[in-house]
Image (cartoon, coloured by chain):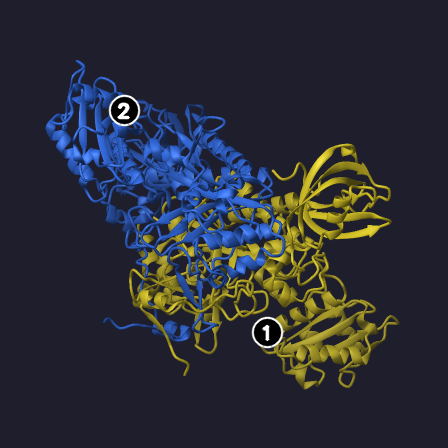
Chain colours: A blue, B yellow
Amino acid sequence: MYRTHTCGELRIQDKGRKVTLAGWVQKSRRLGGMTFIDLRDRYGITQLVVEADAPALLVETATSLGREFVIQIEGEVVERQSKNPKMPTGDIEIKTDKINILNKSITPPFTIEDESDGGEDIRAKYRYLDLRRGPLKKALTLRHKVAHEVRNYLDAKGFLEIETPYLIKSTPEGARDFVVPSRMNPGQFYALPQSPQTFKQLLMVAGYDRYFQIVRCFRDEDLRADRQPEFTQIDCEMSFVEQEDVLNTFEGMMRTLFKNVLDVDIPNPLPRMSWYDAMDRYGSDKPDVRFGMTIHEITSAAKGKGFGVLDGAAYIGAICVPGAAEYTRKQIDELTEWVKRPQVGAKGLIYIKVNEDGTYKSSIDKFYGPEDLEKIASAAEASKGDLILIMSGDNIRKVQTMLGVLRIEMGGRLGLRDPKVFAPLWIVDFPLLEWDDETQRFYAMHHPFTAPKPEHEKWFYSNKKEDLERVCANAYDFVLNGTELGGGSIRIHNADVQKRMFEVLGIGAEEAEYKFGFIINAFKFGAPPHGGLAFGFDRVCSLFGGSDSIRDYIAFPKNNQGRDVMIDSPSQIDREQLDELRIDIRADE
Amino acid sequence: MYRTHTCGELRIQDKGRKVTLAGWVQKSRRLGGMTFIDLRDRYGITQLVVEADAPALLVETATSLGREFVIQIEGEVVERQSKNPKMPTGDIEIKTDKINILNKSITPPFTIEDESDGGEDIRAKYRYLDLRRGPLKKALTLRHKVAHEVRNYLDAKGFLEIETPYLIKSTPEGARDFVVPSRMNPGQFYALPQSPQTFKQLLMVAGYDRYFQIVRCFRDEDLRADRQPEFTQIDCEMSFVEQEDVLNTFEGMMRTLFKNVLDVDIPNPLPRMSWYDAMDRYGSDKPDVRFGMTIHEITSAAKGKGFGVLDGAAYIGAICVPGAAEYTRKQIDELTEWVKRPQVGAKGLIYIKVNEDGTYKSSIDKFYGPEDLEKIASAAEASKGDLILIMSGDNIRKVQTMLGVLRIEMGGRLGLRDPKVFAPLWIVDFPLLEWDDETQRFYAMHHPFTAPKPEHEKWFYSNKKEDLERVCANAYDFVLNGTELGGGSIRIHNADVQKRMFEVLGIGAEEAEYKFGFIINAFKFGAPPHGGLAFGFDRVCSLFGGSDSIRDYIAFPKNNQGRDVMIDSPSQIDREQLDELRIDIRADE
């Protein structure tokens, strides 16, 4: 071993101890003939001092050290003259007798500090240097801890971690697969799994009634910011359970994570909200409940004053932004422009200021007198000082969604979205089916194996559209601070229910056989009732770390073009490889 | 929850308890009007009984149950009339009041028993049914346990599990890569990692001084029996360590595994054997030391009697097979044929029987008198009753290897290779370089980043072939019962040593830059001294389970053609997928 201690562990109690340390030179400086060196490793930073009267060779070595040199030193722990209370090792320094340069370093392209001077691109290229910085070390350490706690919790609950294959089969449903040409089977391809969904259901058929896996998944999607072509899931499935059992088990897991990783107590039991409530009140199926500012329907209060935009709308909704009655015209104009951007898609924004003196000022004063405005304010449950923001339209869910986006924005602007505050909850009672106007058919909101609630069976077997729209699924999402961290469902295990589901979705017997034949066949051999869920592990880690970016929580992430700029991948391969695989790359058209 | 208890947990102490169980019908039988049902789940089997005087509907349901039906039952725990001491639940049965058929099953294509009547192919196709069998449940449960113990041990030692990417870059060294065409970067490919070697070394450069990962690896090799295109490694790396630190750490890990998984104590410290000793005495770099029968060099004892085959050989070696002096001529002929098979490749086999009465009988009696034979027997350290088997040749290692293969075979035939006996050891002091006669150059025995032993530096910088052949590497293998379970090395962190290594291997600066430029560049920024190793996780599990087959320890393995016959993969993909990827499949030539 090149060291007796790490750079993070020596304290004043160690005074007088002879130690050997090894690490990287964070920085060095001379002061009155003395040389001070900050030595860094994974565990912290310890200050070294080489006295002015030390042997000349030692002083020379000490002064020759560049940033990021790797050194091994020997010396004695002494009390510092001027202590640094910000550093855990700040009470001591090492009076250094010996320096052994283990490796030199050329000058790094950016500073290895908590706040680096390097831009995103250069840091991505030299990821192995960026990973030396404190925030990334903290992120990866947290990730390890979260994974370890997940495993301990699930192991204690009798779950088995079972590895499922990565070289599987391309399926015609869902997102785009990454495929892998098979050399041994020319013209044929494996696919990388988008999730182990099929395999975990097979494991239920096989009797492994509590399965989990922390597993990589792959999706060849056009990448949005913060989407990765490969990502990690905590994937779980249980047999002989009802929805309540799944929720309790994984609520317990999340409670343990919050406690053991962050020392945060979350409510027991966790709040649950129906999908309908979430949409009505938050305009989102992943509501951020750290703050109020909920949506109020004001349809009846706002109609009938001759203002065509509202009179003609099927739905009118409002949020009340506290303290924003002070907003200037310019601020409101900016907000109006903001909601008109295609990302939100609103046609406009109506406002009513509820002034502190009880008067109103609105963009619809022409049509609405003070009493009319008061009626609306009352319907919106506005208080003095609130700015009421109103949207309307014919598609209720669409208007609610736009109001929800606006709500999140205003919450952010008002500083109500503190990443150190955690407000987890379950969203339950999702609709089973979504009607698509364009194709005039139903789609499965989750997937075609999600079970309808048994108590909604009568609607499920009805042929009326409005009945089918009412059927809820035994599906659930775990939502934290406006982000869906996980979700799942109770699966259909009954062949008749499955048949009916395909019928409702307009999937014929032949198509069902083609798309899902394999799993349907497996289910004929005694499938138990089962259900499960999956958590987005990268996202769990980033939210636990109080960050918006999952990239900081992945050791070697890819950029928005799906490239690893550090290793410069993907890249061309050799002609011989293509020959062996018996594939050709098409010439540019 | 569909059950109050599992099918493995009820005991005589639970007598009188009302319980609900769920599981699969293992079998049912009628006996004097009563119906007995064996109900199975992951945890065991519990016997249900439906009395002859039970309600007619219940009796009817009970008698209607087919094999592998999934049922839920309610009843009372009662003491059995005739107990079954072989079953943990054998003292009780459930007097059943209610049976709820959760799912029917069509007749499975083979029996779901510990010893199935199904052949390998049919069981592979219906893997989800095969996985219901006891031995596979035990195997996967053991695998979970081993992984969990590994993680707990390494976590406690300060290791971080860090996930490295699966979509990486094809490298021109090593085995064949699986590649993944990139849709977003047409004409370019990712590769699936053969191991995270580069990334773990980068993590050392990044300062994560104790890394591990239980990780999938991929190799597109022509598959031998029991090789899988995807397999799992326990991959580990440490910084600021010497070989001794790595060996101690992972010896500790294996000791913990043996203790906590198998309740087996392995020696502390573990035996170590140099590669030279292993080759000389066992003819293998992965010796099975569960039994002796070691190789003895008898070159000088056996030469000079006018027998050309031996007189002309550079090396003559022998093993003594205890008790085999009784072998008939036929048995010895069969052995001779066995060593002449191409898998062994011997030209022939000389034998000397050391009879119990002190006389000798050999295949070389024409040239060797009793005293000559006694001299050889003495050199071979033979005892009375031994059969001495002798091979010779010019390539010492080749002869030793053939004798080693013969030794393993004889050990097997004599029942000396009990899978319940565990004899782990380290093999150390591997040669750094291997001379290849054909290309007249040296190759790295492990890989070009393996460090030479510092004490052999003078030979490493010599230009004499015999000096370079003497250089040992700081490399090590963990061997158990004749199988290499893991191996690794201390890596070169010094740029000068690396440069010399490339020089010795005849890799020019340009080639080095092309093949290894990326990692060489990263090493310029302060690489710490580091080393590590990787264990073959599938193999660790199978040996711990006392099995030769890793396939039983993988939930969904592939066959020897790299196919998953259950999901029928690899398979053809859609024309549109090829279009999007901008690749074509070549027409058959």
x, y percentage for residue A538? Answer: 39, 43
Q: Is residue B347 above or below residue B468?
A: below
- The quadrant holding residue A61 is top left
x, y percentage for residue A81? Answer: 32, 22
Binning the other alpha carbons within 10 Å of mark 2 as few (below 14), some (14 to 19) or many (20 upward) gives many
Instruction: Nearest to the eye among marks 2 and 1: give it.
Output: 2
Rounded to the nearest whole Å, what is the CA distance between mark 2 and mark 1? 89 Å
Q: Answer yes or no: is residue B528 visible.
A: no
x, y percentage for residue B478? Answer: 58, 55
Tag 1 subunit: B
Residue occupied by mark 1: B398
Q: Is residue A58 above or below residue A443?
A: above
Q: Which mark is residue A380?
A: 2
Residue in front for this viewpoint, A556 or A269: A269
Disc 1 marks a residue whose amino acid type is Lys
In this rendering, position of residue B368 left or right of residue B295 = right
Disc 2 marks a residue whose amino acid type is Ala
- The quadrant holding residue B362 is bottom right
Q: Answer yes or no: is residue A354 visible.
A: yes
Does the CB distance between marks 2 and 1 fall below 8 Å?
A: no
Residues tagged by mark 2 and mark 1 found on one chain of the structure: no
- If the image is split into quadrants, where does the C terminus of chain A sit? bottom left
- Residue at x-position 75% and y-position 44%: B58
